[in-house]
Amino acid sequence: PVLRWLLTKKGMMTSVGCDHGAFVKTTPACDQADLQVRFLAAKALGPDGMTTYTKFRSTRSVEDGYSFQSVAIRAKSKGRVRLASSNTHVKPSIDGGYLSNSEDIATLREGIKLGRALGNRPEWGAYLGQEVYPGTHIQTDDQIDEYIKNSVHTANALTGTCKMGVGKDAVVDPELRVIGVNGVRVADSSVIPCITGGQTGTPTVMIADRAAAFISNPSTMTAVYSTDEVEPARAVATA
C-alpha cells in the first residue's frame, strides 16, 4: 500500500482512516444533529478510542475489523480552567466536567446502540465480525452508561477556554485580542465560544486566517459587536 501511494497517489493510504460517517438526531425533539458517528475500517485495540493510536506502533499484528465511534457534538456538559497560582510556572487547574449533564450520556448511549445496529447488518456478508467493545455482555442502559463513563475521551476537539465575545466572561474580543492585555492575540480553537457541531480543524484554520488579516492589514478590520449572550463552549465526549 505504501509503495502504491508513493508511485500513484492512490489506494488505501490516501484515506485518513476516519473519513466516513454520519450526523444523526438521537431523538425527534432535537432541532439539529446531536450525534456524530465515525466509521473506521479498523479493529480498535481498546475501548476508549485513543488506545489504538498509542499502541499501534508497538503492536506486531493487528486483526481485521471495523469500528464505530460516537461523538456528542452538541454536548451540554461544561468544564472550566482556572489559575492555580499567580506563578505562571504553575499548571492551571483543569476540570473537564465530562458527562456532568445526563443528556450527553443519553446521546452517547444512543450512539452505542446505533453503532451496534450498523455493525451487525447482514449486508456485511463475509466481513461481518463479532462485537468486541462494549461486548455482548453489556446490554442494559445502566451497563452501557457505565461503559461510557469508563471509556469517554475528548474527541480531540477542545474549545472555549479563551472564549471570544463581548460579555463579562469573554477572554478575547471579536478581533482576537486578549482583553486587558496589549499586543496579545489568541488564534486557535480555544476562542470558539460555542463548540461547532463537527470537526474543529477547519474553523481553527479560518480563525488563524482572520488573525493573519487583522495583524497584516489592521486598517481594514471591521468588527460587528453584539450584546447578546453567547452560549458557553461544550465538552465533547466519545465512546
Image (tube, rainbow, N blue to C red):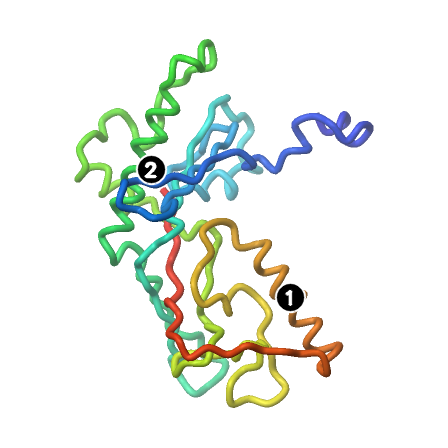
Left or right of 125: which side holds 34?
left
- Depth check: give the residue in front, 67 or 26: 26
- Depth check: give the residue in front, 14 or 225: 225
Q: Point out residue 148 in the picture as x, y percentages from the top left corner.
A: 29, 43
- Say which residue appears at 47% left-offset and 56% top-offset: 196
Residue located beneath label 2 in the image: 111
**Residue 18 against residue 179 in the figure, above or below:** above
Q: Residues within 10 Å of mark 1 (few under 14, many from 20)?
A: some
Q: Point out residue 35 in the picture as x, y percentages from the top left corner.
A: 38, 43
Amino acid type of the residue tagged 2 in the rendering: Gly
Q: Point out residue 123 in the picture as x, y percentages from the top left corner.
A: 43, 14
Quadrant location of the N terminus in the rendered image = top right
Secondary structure of the residue carrying numbered label 1: helix
Mark linked to residue 93: none
Quadrant location of the C terminus in the rendered image = top left
Mark linked to residue 208: 1
Q: Point out residue 11 in the picture as x, y percentages from the top left corner.
A: 70, 25
- Say which residue appears at 38% left-offset and 39% top-offset: 24
